[in-house]
Image (tube, grey):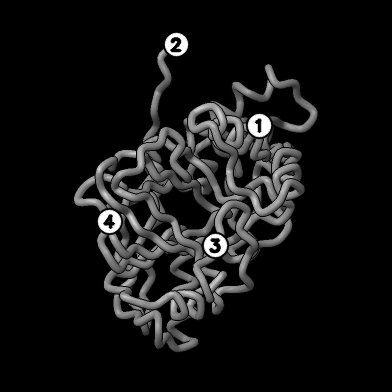
């Protein structure tokens, strides 16, 4: 049977709020917004509060012209909360909170970091809340990042489906991600230790429908990289449901796509959206730096 894609008519809610210190310019009808009038190196507490509100509302926000140092990137990120321990990457010398995400022009890989639909490090007992990513060098084309609104996707499910999903817990594990890296590249992902890798494979069960700790907004918490099962279900029962939900979340109507420029600073809320970074720019260098803000237990 042909799968019917749906349009969220009546459910779009990405209009910008009026702010006193910043301006939010929506990127798409579903999610995302550009923030103007904000110098991230000299942001007042009032402007920061408005920027936080914009992030909760739009799920992903970005600033152009953010030509900042690693130290400034770290200091801005620290205003959003404690730093999370990154499972995969090491920080830059002297600023461990800022991690490089770089692909050289001569690099050829079939297992690019971040190339599947995912929410960051969902296998952890307390997954990260917010991720930031700063661009330094970008390819002339390709290397775009796309996000999908998990709250809008939940609202667009039928009441019966929402009721069925509400009590379920999804098992998140890095096992498939590790296996893919070994199969395609012949090498393991660079975990900090053998114990960290073992814990990532064991994973954690989280509510499949989670509640945002600040907004109270409910959203789907499932992706194609880490979601490997549903507690209390067999694999043959859970896999079709997980596949359906990932396809549902990532349909075009629920997404926004960013074409990178140098000196962009982008933030997204892992508790409310998925993201994807395709491997489509061989022959060009892409240099990014990211920080990750700690989250709490998923509820």
Marks 1 and 2 sit apart, C-alpha to C-alpha, by 25 Å
Mark 1 secondary-structure assignment: strand
According to the picture, the residue beneath numbered tag 4 turns out to be: 138
Secondary structure under tag 3 reads strand
The residue labelled by disc 1 is 228
Looking at marks 4 and 2 on the same chain, the residue that comes earlier in the sequence is marked by: 2
Residue receiving disc 3? 130
* Vertical relation: 119 (above or below) 225: below
Task: Reply above or below: 76 against 30.
Answer: below
Do the numbered discs 4 and 3 sit on residues whose CB atoms are within 8 Å?
Answer: no
Q: Is residue 36 above or below residue 266?
A: below
Determine the residue positioned at 50% across, 68% down. Answer: 92
Q: Position of residue 69 (x, y in %)?
A: 39, 77
Q: Position of residue 125 (x, y in %)?
A: 74, 52
Please give left or right for residue 143 compared with residue 160 in the image: left
Q: CA distance from mark 2 to mark 3?
A: 38 Å
Return the residue at label 2: 1
- Whichever of labels 2 and 3 marks the residue nearer the N terminus, that label is 2
């Amino acid at each position: 049977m042909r799968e019917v894609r749906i349009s969220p008519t009546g459910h779009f809610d990405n209009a910008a709020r009026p702010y006193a210190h910043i301006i939010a310019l929506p990127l798409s009808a579903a999610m995302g917004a550009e923030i103007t009038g904000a110098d991230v190196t000299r942001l007042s507490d009032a402007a920061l509060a408005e920027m936080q509100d914009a992030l909760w509302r739009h799920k992903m926000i970005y600033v152009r012209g953010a030509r900042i140092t690693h130290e400034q990137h770290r200091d801005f990120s620290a205003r959003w909360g404690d730093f999370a321990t990154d499972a995969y990457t090491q920080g830059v010398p002297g600023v461990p909170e800022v991690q490089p995400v770089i692909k050289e022009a001569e690099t050829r890989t079939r297992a690019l970091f971040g190339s599947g639909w995912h929410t960051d490090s969902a296998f952890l007992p307390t997954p990260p809340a917010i991720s930031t990513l700063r661009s330094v060098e970008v390819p002339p084309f390709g290397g775009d990042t796309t996000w999908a609104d998990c709250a809008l996707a939940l609202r667009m499910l039928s009441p019966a489906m929402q009721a069925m999903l509400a009590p379920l817990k999804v098992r998140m594990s890095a096992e498939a991600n590790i296996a893919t890296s070994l199969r395609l590249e012949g090498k393991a992902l660079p975990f900090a230790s053998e114990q960290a890798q073992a814990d990532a494979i064991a994973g954690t069960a989280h509510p499949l429908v989670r509640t945002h700790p600040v907004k109270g907004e409910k959203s789907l918490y499932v992706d194609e990289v880490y979601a490997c099962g549903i507690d209390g279900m067999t694999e043959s029962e859970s896999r079709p449901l997980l596949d359906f939900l990932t396809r549902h979340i990532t349909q075009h109507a629920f997404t926004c796509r960013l074409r990178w420029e140098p000196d962009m600073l982008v933030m997204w809320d892992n508790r409310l959206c998925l993201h994807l970074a395709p491997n489509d720019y061989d022959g060009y260098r892409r240099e990014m730096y990211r920080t990750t803000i700690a989250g709490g237990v998923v509820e």
